[in-house]
């Protein structure tokens, strides 16, 4: 049995992409899987989680102490294949290659682009920091066995910089999202958003768009640091807190449209937002930022409306349109659901992950 060790110093042990999708898929298909992560040690769904304790708040302590602890725990697993998930751990990934291991770097984000929007880095220094990181990343991945990218755009940026690449998209699991068959005409006059709530994720856009819509409601679910939103002080907006999967499915089942109006940051423009595909899987039409990658999904499948994130009036009108025309909304939602069943789901991506791992075992170049 091939021993696989996934490694993260940043993400929670039950992270959606790392644990629920990748680790569990591998464990269910004959691999012996360990996940080294912050937190406690335990076993779940055939995966052994090796806890590394609480992750320090201080960045320096994380870089010089905690990351080293994570590496030590990973090295002790003596796995055949190591799968790293954080840029912070790249130097340790290279060390494992030099121990004769097969090592994968999983690039969840376009990190050089992401750095350009980091609020804790002064704007004047961001281009230099981004460029320096990209050079470091290139030197590192050249030594690794392969890079897994969360989008085709990210894979293209790695294609000439590493030995092997493949895209494994972070699409939803079909058994996680309940297709909501309740007629939209019987639902509340409600839109929804589920995910991290922040300015760059459209927090202000959504709340401003709802101001004129008396008699309509936007329900926000997810992590939030804005006390005004948490206190439900915005008109026509209700914050429902953090929801588990059952709660999220119930939220989708009460709503007539899902919002994903992220700001046009360097990282988001070429991303594939998991929430957009969750809305589609639940049978909701989507109101999404008009970014080229998103446009391809929404227009090809006729499952929503694209908007400019700075056009608040258009967003207001579009929310009202979907809520006022439940038959049209439900028809678009059905088309989105069909697209997810046919293509945009983890079952398809999980099969690609397994084929990729098997090609690594055989020493072959995987199909991209």
Image (cartoon, rainbow, N blue to C red):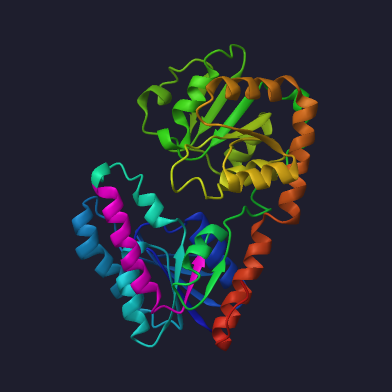
Quadrant housing the N terminus: bottom right
Asked whether 143 falls inside the magenta stretch, the response is yes
Query: Residue 307, image x and y in percent?
Result: 59, 31
Q: Main secondary structure of the magenta part?
A: helix
Residue 131 occupies which quadrant of the picture? bottom left
Q: Nearer the viewer, residue 50 or 186?
A: 186
Q: Is residue 296 above or below residue 2?
A: above
Query: Residue 204, image x and y in percent?
Result: 44, 26
Q: Which residues are magenta?
A: 125-148
Q: Residue at x 38, y 88 (%)?
A: 100
Q: Nearer the viewer, residue 318 or 211?
A: 318
Query: Residue 205, image x and y in percent?
Result: 49, 27
Q: Nearer the viewer, residue 315 or 73?
A: 315
Say whether residue 238 is left or right of residue 94. Answer: right
Q: Is residue 230 above or below residue 194?
A: above
Query: Residue 60, image x and y in percent?
Result: 19, 57
Residue 284, can we see it? no
Residue 272, can we see it? yes
Q: Residue at x 66, y 29 (%)?
A: 255
Q: Is residue 228 above or below residue 161?
A: above
Residue 7 occupies which quadrant of the picture? bottom left
Asked whether 168 falls inside the magenta stretch, the response is no
Say whether residue 39 is left or right of residue 346. Answer: left
């Amino acid at each position: 049995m091939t021993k696989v060790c996934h490694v993260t110093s940043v993400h929670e042990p039950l992270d959606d992409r790392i644990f629920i999708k990748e680790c569990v898929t591998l464990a269910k298909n004959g691999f012996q899987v360990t996940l080294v992560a912050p937190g406690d040690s335990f076993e779940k769904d055939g995966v052994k989680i090796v806890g590394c304790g609480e992750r320090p708040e201080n960045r320096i302590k994380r870089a010089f102490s905690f990351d080293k602890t994570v590496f030590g725990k990973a090295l002790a697993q003596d796995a055949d294949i190591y799968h790293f998930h954080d840029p912070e751990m790249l130097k340790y990934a290279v060390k494992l290659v030099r121990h004769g291991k097969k090592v994968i770097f999983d690039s969840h984000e376009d990190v050089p682009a992401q750095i350009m929007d980091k609020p804790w880095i002064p704007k004047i220094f961001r281009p230099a920091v981004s460029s320096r990181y990209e050079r470091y990343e290139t030197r590192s991945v050249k030594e690794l066995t392969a890079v897994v990218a969360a989008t085709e755009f990210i894979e293209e940026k790695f294609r000439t910089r590493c030995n092997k690449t493949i895209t494994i998209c972070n699409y939803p699991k079909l058994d996680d999202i309940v297709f909501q068959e309740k007629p939209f005409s019987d639902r509340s006059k409600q839109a929804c958003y589920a995910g991290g709530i922040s300015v760059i994720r459209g927090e202000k856009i959504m709340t401003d768009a709802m101001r004129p819509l008396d008699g309509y409601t936007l329900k926000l679910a997810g992590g939030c640091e804005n006390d005004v939103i948490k206190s439900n002080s915005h008109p026509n907006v209700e914050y429902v807190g953090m929801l588990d999967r059952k709660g999220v499915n119930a939220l989708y089942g009460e709503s007539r449209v899902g919002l994903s109006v992220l700001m046009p940051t360097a990282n988001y423009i070429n991303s594939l937002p998991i929430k957009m595909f969750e809305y589609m899987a639940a049978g909701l039409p989507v109101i999404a930022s008009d970014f080229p990658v998103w446009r391809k999904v929404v227009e090809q499948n006729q499952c929503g409306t694209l908007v400019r994130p700075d056009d608040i009036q258009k967003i207001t009108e579009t929310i009202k349109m979907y809520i006022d025309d439940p038959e049209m909304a439900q028809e678009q939602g059905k088309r989105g659901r069909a697209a997810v069943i046919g293509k945009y789901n983890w079952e398809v991506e999980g099969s690609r992950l397994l084929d990729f791992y098997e090609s690594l075992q055989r020493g072959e170049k995987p199909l991209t």
